[in-house]
C-alpha cells in the first residue's frame, strides 16, 4: 500500500506566524495555515489541522461504510458523511483534539434502517482513520 505525504512550510512564532500546507502526494492543493485562525471561531479562508483531519475522517469513513454495507448485503446508492473535529485547551497544557462527531445518512438498497445503523457502527470501529485516532472520543450519529 502507498504512503501519502503532505508538507508544511512555517514562518514565525505560534502567535504571529503562518504557513502553507501542500498535499504533495496528489499535488491537488496548497492551503494557508495560521494558529490565530485555527483557534478562532471563523476560519477566514485558512484551514487547520483539525479541518484536514475532518476531511480525512469523513472521506475514509464513507469509503469504509460503503465496504461494510456491501459485506452486509446492501448496495450503497449515496452516503453523506460529516466529521466535526473540536480543538480545546488541554488541562495538561497546550491544546488537544477533544472529540470528533461523525454524522451519516444515506440511501442503501437491500438493508433496513437497523441494518444501516449496524453497518455504520461497524464502519466507525474499522475505519483506518478512526483506528489512528484512538484515544479521541469519536461519536456517531446516524441520521
Image (cartoon, grey):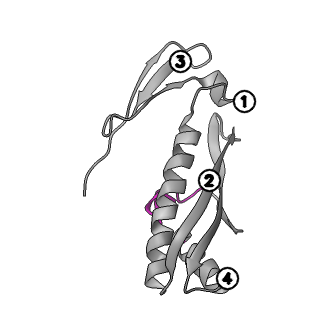
Q: Residue at x 60, y 61 (%)?
A: 80
Q: Which residues are magenta?
A: 125-136
Tell me the element at label 3.
Answer: strand
Mark 4 secondary-structure assignment: helix
Q: Residue furthest right?
A: 41
Q: Is residue 109 left or right of residue 91?
A: left
Tell me how far mark 4 sits from mark 2, CA to CA.
21 Å
For marks 3 and 2, the one nearer the N-term is: 3
Number of numbered labels in the structure image: 4
Residue 28 x %, y % = 38, 35
| Disc ID at residue 113 | 4
What is the x, y in percent for residue 98?
67, 49
Q: Nearer the viewer, residue 48 or 117?
A: 117
Which circle marks residue 42 in the picture? 1
Residue 126 seen in the current view: no
Residue drawn 58% across the image and 85% down it: 111
Q: CA distance from mark 3 to mark 1?
A: 16 Å
Q: Position of residue 45 (x, y in %)?
A: 61, 26
Q: Is residue 49 magenta?
A: no
Q: Say whether disc 4 or disc 2 marks the residue closer to the N-terminus.
A: 2
Residue 127 on the magenta span: yes
Mark whose residue sits in front, 3 or 1 = 1
| Secondary structure under the numbered disc 2 in the rendered image | strand
Amino acid at each position: 500500500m502507498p504512503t501519502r505525504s503532505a508538507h508544511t512550510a512555517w514562518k514565525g512564532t505560534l502567535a504571529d506566524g503562518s504557513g502553507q500546507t501542500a498535499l504533495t502526494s496528489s499535488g491537488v492543493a496548497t492551503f494557508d495555515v495560521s494558529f490565530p485562525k485555527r483557534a478562532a471561531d471563523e476560519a477566514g479562508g485558512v484551514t487547520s489541522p483539525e479541518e484536514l483531519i475532518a476531511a480525512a475522517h469523513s472521506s475514509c469513513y464513507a469509503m469504509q461504510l460503503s465496504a461494510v454495507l456491501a459485506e452486509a448485503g446492501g448496495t450503497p446508492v449515496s452516503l453523506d458523511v460529516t466529521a466535526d473535529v473540536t480543538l480545546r485547551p488541554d488541562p495538561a497544557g497546550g491544546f488537544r483534539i477533544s472529540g470528533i462527531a461523525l454524522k451519516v445518512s444515506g440511501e442503501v438498497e437491500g438493508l433496513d434502517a437497523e441494518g444501516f445503523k449496524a453497518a455504520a457502527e461497524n464502519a466507525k470501529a474499522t475505519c483506518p482513520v478512526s483506528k489512528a485516532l484512538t484515544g479521541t472520543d469519536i461519536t456517531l450519529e446516524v441520521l
